[in-house]
C-alpha cells in the first residue's frame, strides 16, 4: 500500500502559472479605485510580514507600495497594470462565500436578558507538544491546548464545555449577548457589534480560537438532508440555518455544539472591524483567504457565477472555515442588506492572485513582464 502523501503546504508547493493579462479582465476603474485604497492600507503590513504562501518576499512589494499613495486618482487601474502580474494558484477554481459585521443585542455586564458571555482570550490557552508526539514528528506549530492539573498537555475546552461554564469566574467576560444563536453566528463572522439597551455600542473583534476544528453546521444540515423547498425543509443559507435553530431549540443547540470551535474576542476601539491583517476591512473590497495560498495584503481577482462578487478584492482577513487554495470569503459590510448578501453568497468560478512582477520573475513564470 503506498504511503499517504503529505498535504500541500502552500501555493508555491501546489504550483503557480501565469494568468491572463490584466487588460483582458475588464476591470472597472471604480472597482480598481476601491481596491487601490484598501491596498494602500495594507502596505505597511505587507512590508513587515513574512508570506506563508511562498509566492512573494517583503521586498517584492516595495516599489508598488511606494508608488500607490501618490498614484493618480483618475487611473487607478493603471497602477495594477504597472506593478502587478496575475497568477493562477493550482487550477484556480474558486469557491467564495460571504461574511458581514453583525449587530446583536447584549450588555456590558450580566443581567436579566443578557446571560451569554463573550470571552476574551484565556491565559491558559497555550501551544505545546503532547508528550506522546515523538520529537521526529514535531514539525510546524505545536497544537493549541492547556496544561491540566496533572501536568499533561491536553486539548482546550470545546464549545460544550465552555457553554457549561468551564471559563466562568476568571474575569474573561467582555460583554454578554442576549441570544446565544446570534453570538454563535457573530463568532463565525469573527467580529461584530453588541448593542446595549442604553445605546452603547461594544465593537468586538477576533482574538483567537480554542484550537478545536471548525465544523460547518450548514454542512451537517446538508448531510442530514434538512435543506430543500418542500415543507419541513430549510433554505441553504444562513437565514435558513437560523430558522432551523429557532424552530428546533433542543436539536439546534446540539447541532451548534457539534462545532467544537470557540472564538475568543477582544474589544475594538475606533474604526473597525479589523481583519487578520490588523487593518479595517471594507465592504466589497476586503476578502478572507487562507494565507498559505494567498499573501495577506495581495489583490485577488474573482470571476464567479455570482456577479456581485466579481472583480478586485484585497486579501485582508482569514477565517476558520477558509482553508485551502482558491477558497475565499467576501466581506459585505454591516447591516441587514449585508447579512442577506453574505448569508446567501455561494459562488464558483475562477480566481487570480496579483503578485509583484519581481515575484513572478523569481518564480520563473513566463510572460512575467
Image: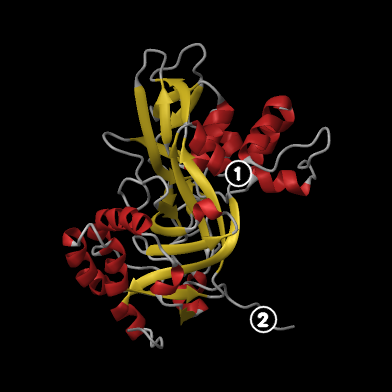
Residue 326 in the image: x percent, y percent? 52, 65
- Residue at 50% across / 11% down in the picture? 112
Residue 130 in the image: x percent, y percent? 51, 58
Horizontally, is 232 left or right of 25 in the view? right
- Residue at 49% across / 74% down in the picture? 89
Q: CA distance from mark 1 to mark 2?
A: 40 Å
Give the quarter of the image for residue 250: top right
Q: In what element is the residue under mark 1?
A: helix
- Residue at 56% across / 37% down in the picture? 340
- Give the answer, above or below, for where 221 lies relative to 93: above
Residue 158 in the image: x percent, y percent? 57, 41
Residue 25 in the image: x percent, y percent? 45, 69
Q: Earlier in the sequence, mark 1 or mark 2?
A: 2
- The residue that label 1 is drawn on is 344
Q: Quadrant of the C terminus?
A: bottom left
- Residue at 64% across / 37% down in the picture? 256
Which of the two marks, 1 or 2, is nearer to us in this view?
A: 1
Horizontally, is 70 left or right of 30 in the view? left
- Which numbered tag is attached to residue 208? none
Q: Nearer the viewer, residue 10 or 79?
A: 79
- The residue that label 2 is drawn on is 3
Q: Look at the image and name its color scheme.
A: secondary structure
Amino acid at each position: 500500500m503506498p504511503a499517504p502523501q503529505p498535504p500541500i503546504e502552500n501555493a508555491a508547493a501546489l504550483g503557480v502559472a501565469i494568468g491572463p493579462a490584466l487588460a483582458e479582465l475588464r476591470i472597472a476603474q471604480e472597482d480598481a479605485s476601491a481596491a487601490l485604497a484598501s491596498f494602500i492600507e495594507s502596505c505597511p503590513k505587507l512590508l513587515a510580514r513574512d508570506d506563508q504562501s511562498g509566492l512573494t518576499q517583503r521586498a517584492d512589494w516595495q516599489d508598488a507600495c511606494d508608488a500607490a499613495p501618490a498614484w493618480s486618482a483618475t487611473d487607478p487601474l493603471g497602477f495594477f497594470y504597472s506593478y502587478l502580474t496575475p497568477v493562477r494558484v493550482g487550477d484556480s477554481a474558486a469557491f467564495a462565500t460571504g461574511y458581514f459585521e453583525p449587530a446583536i443585542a447584549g450588555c456590558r455586564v450580566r443581567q436579566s436578558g443578557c446571560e451569554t458571555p463573550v470571552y476574551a482570550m484565556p491565559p491558559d490557552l497555550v501551544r505545546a507538544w503532547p508528550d506522546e508526539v515523538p520529537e521526529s514528528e514535531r514539525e510546524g506549530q505545536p497544537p493549541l491546548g492547556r496544561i491540566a492539573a496533572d501536568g499533561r498537555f491536553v486539548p482546550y475546552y470545546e464549545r460544550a464545555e465552555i457553554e457549561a461554564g468551564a471559563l466562568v469566574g476568571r474575569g474573561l467576560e467582555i460583554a454578554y449577548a442576549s441570544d446565544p444563536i446570534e453570538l454563535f453566528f457573530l463568532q463565525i463572522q469573527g467580529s461584530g457589534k453588541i448593542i446595549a439597551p442604553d445605546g452603547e455600542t461594544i465593537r468586538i473583534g477576533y482574538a483567537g480560537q480554542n484550537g478545536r476544528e471548525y465544523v460547518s453546521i450548514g454542512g451537517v444540515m446538508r448531510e442530514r438532508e434538512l435543506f430543500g423547498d418542500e415543507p419541513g425543509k430549510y433554505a441553504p443559507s444562513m437565514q435558513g440555518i437560523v430558522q432551523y435553530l429557532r424552530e428546533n431549540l433542543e436539536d439546534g443547540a446540539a447541532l451548534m455544539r457539534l462545532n467544537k470551535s470557540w472564538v475568543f474576542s477582544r474589544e475594538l476601539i475606533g474604526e473597525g472591524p479589523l481583519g487578520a491583517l490588523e487593518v479595517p476591512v471594507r465592504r466589497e473590497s476586503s476578502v478572507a483567504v487562507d494565507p498559505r495560498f494567498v499573501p495577506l495584503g495581495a489583490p485577488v481577482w474573482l470571476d464567479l457565477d455570482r456577479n456581485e462578487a466579481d472583480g478586485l478584492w484585497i486579501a485582508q482577513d482569514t477565517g476558520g472555515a477558509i482553508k485551502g487554495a482558491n477558497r475565499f470569503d467576501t466581506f459585505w459590510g454591516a447591516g441587514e442588506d449585508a447579512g442577506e448578501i453574505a448569508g446567501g453568497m455561494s459562488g464558483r468560478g475562477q480566481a487570480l492572485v496579483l503578485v509583484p512582477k519581481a515575484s513572478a520573475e523569481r518564480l520563473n513564470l513566463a510572460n512575467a513582464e
